[in-house]
Image: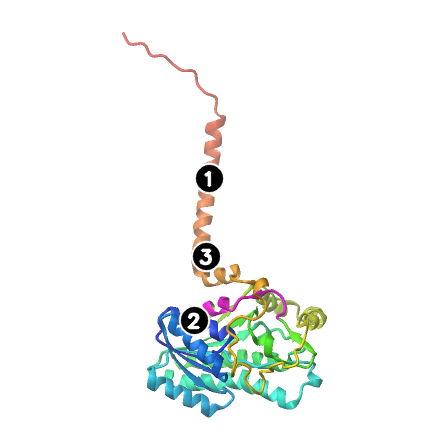
Amino acid sequence: MKVVVITGASAGVGRATAREFAKRGCSIALLARGEAGLFAAKRDVEELGGRAITQVCDVSDAAAVEAAAERVEQELGPIDVWVNNAMASVYGPFHKVSIADFRRVTEVTYLGTVYGTKAALKRMLLRNRGAIVQVSSALGFRSIPLQSAYCGAKHAIEGLSESLRTELIHMNSDVHITTVALPGVNTPQFEWTKTLMGKKGKPVGKIYQPEVPARVIVWAAQHRRKRIVIGLPTLESLIGERLMSGVFDHYIADSAWTGSISDEPLPDQYPANLHTPADQHRDYGAHGRFDRESAKRSVQVWLNLHREWLLLAIPVAAAIYAWSVTKEPTRDRERSAPKRPHRVIEFA
């Protein structure tokens, strides 16, 4: 794992992921629209021992994505890992979201993933190696109100990835594609996502620091796992949708509507990131405003990533337990058996 491309690398999960790859000495191409965020991300990578190049790139432009991939291979070498992380969203009821905004969310979040995947595969298939990590979401299999465009795009990413995965299997290709389903994450997206609700958005449910999914993305690039679900709430959404989708509809209709919108009014100069980059002149970093309530780790993630060892441990634990049970009656008999009188042997 040497050369990595990350879209949406200037802030949030993309920024934290760049840091994690940098710790492993990778050469990283940072793609995003905001120059200030990209410059700061490059500095982060170099301070952690990695090498970085930046490319101002709107992933909704297929030609720009292809040109970026060509530059990466010329300057850094063959691409080993491509992380499709760039996203955009808008808060508002479906009937109030404009066609232009809906199209923009789809072009960035879904088609940006398509274009990135195509650019990566064009090179990886020739070498028959490489990993593509699609940053998906719990909203990729369980939609909520007020984010219809974003939910639709994330569902599309899941469908795209499943189809492509079967094609790679059919071709006996060693190129691997995996999706990483994120929970609510403490990123700057809640400081700049366009909203029609008059107040700032916020993550639904339990919130995690961006370093949690960043570590999983790096792990996913090195292991052939179909999908990795991050956080117990995401797992609950996946299971709940499959087992009781109708009940979930009624529960989420109210809880996720109110849970998506904070009490904080929008500032006068709210930097909506949908059509123009919010971090063009200001670096927002990886974290949002929810540091105090965000989890730095996830037990569910640890168990998920180490499940092979757990599967090995279960029969071992069962064998030890069975052995202890079979030995227990013997020890009980020994404790309950009457003591025989001490015999004194006399020698002539």
In the rendered structure, the answer to whether residue 335 lies left or right of residue 146 reads left
Residue projecting furthest to the top? 348
Sequence order check, earlier mark of 1 and 2:
2
Sequence order check, earlier mark of 2 and 3:
2
Q: Which mark is residue 310?
A: 3
Amino acid type at circle 1 is Thr
Nearest-to-viewer mark from 1 and 3 = 3
In the rendered structure, the answer to whether residue 211 lies left or right of residue 348 reads right
Give the residues in magenta.
203-215
The Cα–Cα distance between marks 1 and 2, rounded to whole angstroms, is: 52 Å
At 62% across and 90% down in the image, what residue appears?
100
Amino acid type at circle 3 is Leu
Estimate the x, y position of residue 54 in percent, counting from the top left.
Answer: 42, 82
At 41% across and 87% down in the image, what residue appears?
68
**Would residue 224 be seen by someone viewing this image from the given angle?**
no
Q: Which mark is residue 326?
A: 1
